[in-house]
């Protein structure tokens, strides 16, 4: 699996706020530098680097999750309610947004509109 190379340094602190500095999955305190940024809707499925789509995870949980699709309510018990809502708002937009990036993504995901 490739590492995620968004502008992590800039994003990280606001992402960490989403859980109060713990892993969104297991609740373990995240040490600075050992945080991995998780995409709620995996890029593989058409998710983007929209901040609402990003969550802090410890390395173990990130590795275990991979690029599966999960439900926030089941998978991220440590996500604060406000950001939880944002994540699902993003998910709704994603579900309604165009034909690409759906669950049954086959082959390559291309942006062909416009
Ligand atoms: Zn964890």
Image (cartoon, helix red, strand yellow):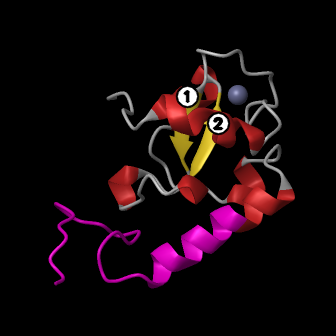
**Residue 76, position as x, y percentages in the image:** 74, 47
The residue identified by callout 2 is 56
Relative horizontal placement of residue 69, taking residue 30 as reference (left or right): left
| Vertical placement of residue 114 versus 59, above or below | below
**Residue 97, position as x, y percentages in the image:** 41, 81
Contact (CB < 8 A) between labels 2 and 1? yes
Residue at 19% from the left image edge and 71% from the top image edge: 111
Task: Note whether residue 64 is visible.
Answer: no
The residue identified by callout 1 is 36
Quadrant housing the C terminus: bottom left
Residue at 39% from the left image edge and 33% from the top image edge: 4
Q: Which residues are magenta?
A: 86-114
Does dot 1 land on a helix, a strand or a loop?
A: strand
Quadrant housing the N terminus: top left
Q: Neighbour class for label 2 at 10 Å: few (<14), some, many (≥20)?
A: many
Q: Does any atom of ligand 1 lie closer than 8 Å to the CB of label 1?
A: no
């Amino acid at each position: 699996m490739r590492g995620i190379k968004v502008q992590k340094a800039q994003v990280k602190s606001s992402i960490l706020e989403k859980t109060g500095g713990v892993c969104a999955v297991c609740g373990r305190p995240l040490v600075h530098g050992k945080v991995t940024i998780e995409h709620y809707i995996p890029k593989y499925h058409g998710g983007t680097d929209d901040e609402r789509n990003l969550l802090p995870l410890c390395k173990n949980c990130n590795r275990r999750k991979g690029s599966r699709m999960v439900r926030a309510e089941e998978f991220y018990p440590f996500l604060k309610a406000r950001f939880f809502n944002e994540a699902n708002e993003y998910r709704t937009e994603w579900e309604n947004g165009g034909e690409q990036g759906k669950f049954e993504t086959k082959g390559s995901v291309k942006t062909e509109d416009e």
